[in-house]
Amino acid sequence: PRSGVPSHWTPITVGGGSDPTVTLCKLDYDTYWRNPSKLPMFKDLVGASGCSGRNTKSARLSVLKAEMENDPDGTLQPNGFVFHETRCGSTLVADMLGSQPHHLVFSESSPPASIAAKGDSQIGVLRDVMLLMCRSSYHTRCFFKFQSINTPRIKTFVKAFPEVPWAFVFREPVQVMMSHMKGGGGGAVCLRSKSHPTPGHAKILGVKNAKSVSNEEFCAAHLAYLSECAYDAYTDLAHTGKGMMLHYADLPESVPTALLRDHFRAPVDAAGTALMLESSKMYSKGRKGTPKAGEFGGDNEKKENAASEKIKTAAKRFLYPIYDKCVAAAEHDKSIHGQ
């Protein structure tokens, strides 16, 4: 677009209650689509958009919903949701989707996550806020890539948007564990709930609390928990045909074809596909100042060779069983799409 993708008011935070206060900001979508890997997360986009002073406003959800219903032309229905195991290529998927100027892409945005955490009682609020986020006079499609903590909430999002297709991105167990546990893994995402494990974690580990469990074992169990939640949603909702299992090994080529064209039913032309594949060559979280900013190269073999016996043993015990089920489901999905 010659004049650039226009900014517009977008919800960035949502309060509590049945009619919450919504804070909006005019986000810099033009900078985002030109190089999504520089602003890989919603917080990065918000941070780059100067969301303070005159560039923010607040209103009750009921007021914003009435405005939306009185002028529905600019409200898009979401085209697809991306859930994931974490450290498995989901940001690459979001960056590829975001490389198209007419695509609205929300990568780990805070409003849906904060609402979905409150459970099914907030489904109406969840739907209204996400529709407000998909409101644009310029964009033609809208996609959400959620935080990994939302994977156990897939069914909540499906209840809010039963018509929207979704995918779960996952990766080979040792590779994904190595991505988490680099540098000893002290601050790893997969260990965040170790001090307060869910019943799902406890069931996989076979313990009541995780005090006696090693970091490697808990990391494997956490990734297995996320994968089991996704697989359960995939099988329980199989009759809808809306779920898809997407293996890291099939990225990036499968994004414009199997995911976007066949599953989300939102194909792009040859130029759009080329732009997507070009964007996939960049490290997906290439924020300015990060050591990996720049061109991306695969590191699967390196990760596997460097893995400790503790990681390999924990992966084999806790993570491989559900991983194998996800692989079989992904192969099934590929056969449907003729991949």
Image (cartoon, rainbow, N blue to C red):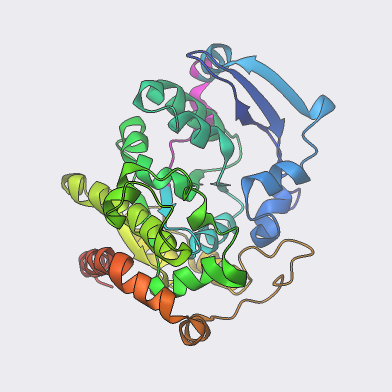
Front in this rendered view, residue 81 or 6: 81
Up the image or down, 233 lies above or below 36; here it is above
User: In this view, which residue lies farthest toward the front?
Assistant: 212
Q: In which quarter of the image is the C terminus?
A: bottom left
**Residue depicted at x 46% and y 69%:** 177
The picture places residue 275, in percent across and down from the top left corner, at: 58, 67
Seen in the image, is 132 located left or right of residue 235?
A: right
First to last magenta residue range: 69-80
**Residue depicted at x 42% and y 58%:** 85
User: In this view, which residue lies farthest toward the left?
Assistant: 239
The image quarter in which residue 35 lies: bottom right
Q: Is residue 67 magenta-colored?
A: no
The picture places residue 52, in percent across and down from the top left corner, at: 80, 30
The picture places residue 188, in percent across and down from the top left corner, at: 56, 59
Q: Is residue 78 magenta-colored?
A: yes
In this view of the protein, can residue 61 be seen by the observer? yes
**Residue depicted at x 43% and y 51%:** 82
Up the image or down, 33 lies above or below 156; here it is below
In this view of the protein, can residue 79 be seen by the observer? no
Front in this rendered view, residue 181 or 91: 181
The picture places residue 87, in percent across and down from the top left corner, at: 51, 63
Up the image or down, 119 lies above or below 232; here it is above
Seen in the image, is 226 located left or right of residue 38?
A: left
Seen in the image, is 29 located left or right of residue 321?
A: right
**Residue depicted at x 52% and y 85%:** 302
Q: How many labels does the image show?
A: 0
Seen in the image, is 270 located left or right of residue 22?
A: left
